[in-house]
Image (cartoon, grey):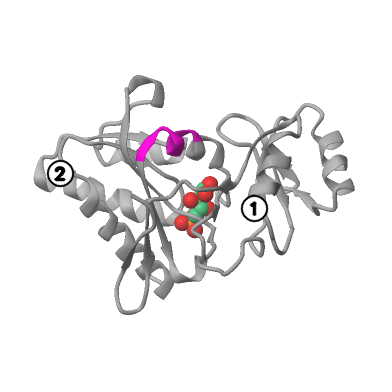
Amino acid sequence: MTNQDALKQLVGQEAVKFIKDGMIVGLGTGSTVKFMVDALGKKVADQHLSIVGVPTSKRTKEQANHLDIPTKDLDEVDHIDLTIDGADQIDKNFQGIKGGGGAHLWEKIVAINSTKNIWIVDQSKLADQLGSFPLPLEVIPYGSHQLFQRLVARGFNPVFRMINNQYVTTDSNNYIIDLHLHQIKDPQNLALTLDQMTGIVEHGLFLNIVNTVIVGQENGPKVLQVRP
Ligand SMILES: O=C(CO)[C@H](O)[C@H](O)COP(=O)(O)O
């Protein structure tokens, strides 16, 4: 296991300490969350916990089910106590970019329906300012090349996310366009602009969402309480 993976595993293990018997828990997506779900599977089995997971992607649902963690879809629960998810970049005001794994649409829907949100990251994800990580947009395939041109005209440096010359598609069968912005001076303003552009289903700016960030560091996970 790489050193970075070891840090991810430690934050995943730290995060499951926040999960108590009886909770409905949003399960994020990504390599860090994968370690958390592994730890949760063990905790559920060892302590005979009765919890329900609400996965934010098909791959997380598959992993949870494989580990015998009961899951429900978002519309089958009446609340979510806590969601634990990863992040691609977090700035000094604890605003985030997500969607590196292409799951930010479901992740944001689950996050805004959760009483509390915890992000688990290794220390490489912390930055003074957002933007060195490309900002993902989930876009409707229909007319996406017209949308692309509008993004070019605004100077947003868009790039369709492709693998082996094929469009990457999300769990909702949409495309991803990554904006190579390099720096985002005003995340709120950019979010408003993107919210108003027809064809964009959701962008990866997660603003004023996270309550607690757990950062993997060499000397152990650090828990940062961001907002109540
Ligand atoms: O937003 C996400 C998926 O859409 C992930 O949470 C984000 O990409 C972090 O992933 P990882 O833990 O693999 O670095």
The image quarter in which residue 66 lies = top left
Q: Is residue 138 above or below residue 219?
A: above
Q: Does the Cβ of the disc 2 residue fall within 8 Å of ligand 1?
A: no
116 relative to 163 in the view: left or right:
left
Give 143 or 151, whichever is nearer the viewer: 151
Q: Tell me residue 227's x, y (percent).
A: 38, 52
Residue 56 visible, this angle? no
The reply to whether the magenta stretch includes residue 113 is: yes
**Which numbered disc covers residue 168?**
none
x then y, percent, for residue 202 = 63, 37
Q: Residues within 10 Å of mark 1 (few under 14, many from 20)?
A: some
Which amino acid is tagged 1?
Answer: Pro
Q: Which residue is at the far left?
A: 47
Residue occupied by mark 2: 45
Task: Label 2, secondary structure: give it.
Answer: helix
Residue at point 82%, 41% (across, down): 148
Which segment is the magenta one?
A: 109-115
Query: Which residue position holds label 1?
Result: 187
Q: Of marks 2 and 1, which one's residue comes earlier in the chain?
A: 2
